[in-house]
Amino acid sequence: MTKRLNIPISSDEIKDLKVGDSVLLSGVMITGRDAVHKWIHDVFINKTKPATPEDLEIMNHLKPLLDGGLIYHCGPVVAGLDTKQYRFVAAGPTTSVREEPYQGDVIKFLNLRGVIGKGGMGPKTLKACHEAPAVYFHAIGGAAALIAESVTEVIGVYKLDFGVPEAIWVIKVEDLPVIVTMDAHNASLHASVRSQSKAVLDKLIA
């Protein structure tokens, strides 16, 4: 049975989710990939780089939006860049493991209820999901145009100087389809598959 969740998502709703659950997400979220996660981590968490007035203004806008919210690991293809009448043409997930060095800290700092991507993440993120609570939602790779149909509005964009795929796009979605593959109860489908695959490989080698 597919569950429907509206963003922001409550802690209780997240705790009710289990690995394997199909979910349709609706509400406002942001996109964020390598540059965004590194920016948040360096400027606001580790504070190894000074925050500019623009950085502070952007974060003041983002924090209320992301309290109980989601970050989508996505490098979209966007139409309307010249007119600023933005429209997502493709919105496929990016491989998430690249954000593993930052994700756990970003979840805690922003009080996220989850992240969306593909390929799963590692133990640091799984631990953060348990503590937050939060989950990892797996989006379908190779269905970028289909997922873009779930984006009903591009509300705005920050850090466009990072480039279109790496910018922070604020989007409204309706019934964006995902599957829970890491939950708030320390279960990870990705870790299970790796473990089972290794056991089969070890048996074959032996």
Image: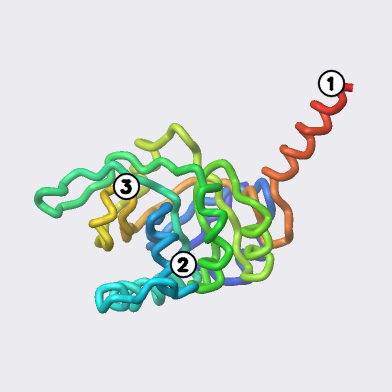
Choose the circle earlier in sequence order: 3 or 1. Answer: 3
How busy is the neighbourhood of tag 2: few (under 14 within 10 Å), some, or many (20 plus)?
many
Instruction: Give SS at disc 3.
Output: loop
Identify the residue at horizontal 60%, vertical 64% (top origin): 134
- Indicate the amino acid at tag 1: Leu
Res. 204 mark:
1
- Indicate the amino acid at tag 3: Pro
Instruction: Locate residue 100: give its quadrant.
Output: bottom right
> Left of 205 or right of it: where is 187?
left
Q: Is residue 54 above or below residue 6?
A: below
Identify the residue at horizontal 27%, vertical 63% (top origin): 158
Instruction: Give SS at disc 1.
Output: helix
Residue, far left: 83
Residue tagged by mark 2? 41
Identify the residue at horizontal 53%, vertical 43% (top origin): 118
Choose the circle earlier in sequence order: 2 or 3. Answer: 2
> Left of 81 or right of it: where is 31?
right
Residue tagged by mark 3? 165
- Judge depth for marks 2 and 1 and give the one in front: 2
In this rendered view, identify the residue nearer to me: 51 or 74.
Answer: 51
